[in-house]
Image (cartoon, rainbow, N blue to C red):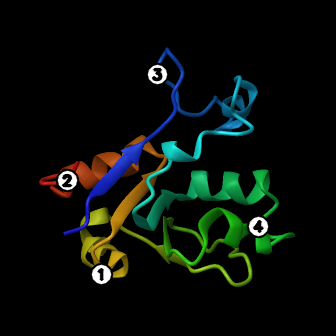
Amino acid sequence: MSSIIYDLAMSLNGYIADRHHSLQWLFEVPGAQEPDPSLFPSDAAVHVEGSSTYLWMLEQEELLENPERWQQLYGQKPTFVFTSRQLPIPEGADVRLVNGPVQEHLEQIRAAANGGDIWVLGGGELAGQFFDAGAWTGSH
């Protein structure tokens, strides 16, 4: 069964994003421009993120203007974005917009992972929904 991985960077006072929902502060710390590749889950077969994280990445990396960057960052891995809005998707990206609680989509996410790990990127509320759905049980 797929493991659910949730890792994040947060400030010492417990913030993931600033008051404008930006993650820019992450890139202002030493070593942020060239993070150690071993920090990223190598077995992640699927990414899951909330709409704020997704939109921030689109803007920060200019992924709509440069869709080839999507492949460099995410490869062919499916990305599930939890949102209640229609969001833009970079050309050629396997982005699946889903709405509702994690519990309603967990089976579909696990099927897309095909036994590989599921990496939850950002969003404490989204991570909490995985916990509430019992998805962490048996994962590392």
Q: Residue at x 50, y 76 (%)?
A: 78
Disc 4 and disc 1 in contact, CB within 8 angstroms? no
Judging by the rendered image, the residue that carries numbered circle 3 is 14
Find the distance from the CA under tag 4 to the CA under tag 1.
26 Å
Task: Tell me which amino acid carries mark 4.
Answer: Arg
For residue 111, which numbered disc appears in the image?
A: 1
Q: Is residue 3 above or below residue 97?
A: above
Judging by the rendered image, the residue that carries numbered circle 2 is 139
Task: Tell me which amino acid carries mark 3.
Answer: Gly
Find the distance from the CA under tag 1 to the CA under tag 3.
33 Å
In the structure shown, which secondary structural element does the residue marked by tag 3 occupy? loop
Q: Does residue 109 appear to the left or right of 98 in the view shown?
A: left
| Depth order, front residue of 46/15 | 46
Between circles 1 and 3, the one closer to the viewer is 1
| Depth order, front residue of 140/17 | 140
Q: Hey, which quadrant is residue 108 in on the image? A: bottom left
Categorize mark 3 by other alpha carbons within 10 Å: few (<14), some (14-19), many (20+): few
Say whether disc 2 or disc 3 marks the residue closer to the N-terminus: 3
Say whether disc 1 or disc 2 marks the residue closer to the N-terminus: 1
Q: Residue at x 38, y 51 (%)?
A: 126
In the structure shown, which secondary structural element does the residue marked by tag 2 occupy? loop
Judging by the rendered image, the residue that carries numbered circle 4 is 69
Say whether disc 1 or disc 3 marks the residue closer to the N-terminus: 3
Find the distance from the CA under tag 4 to the CA under tag 3.
30 Å
Find the distance from the CA under tag 2 to the CA under tag 3.
24 Å
Residue 81 rendering spot, x and y as whole percentages: 50, 66
Say whether disc 4 or disc 3 marks the residue closer to the N-terminus: 3
Disc 2 and disc 3 in contact, CB within 8 angstroms? no
Q: Hey, which quadrant is residue 24 in on the image? A: top right
In the structure shown, which secondary structural element does the residue marked by tag 4 occupy? helix
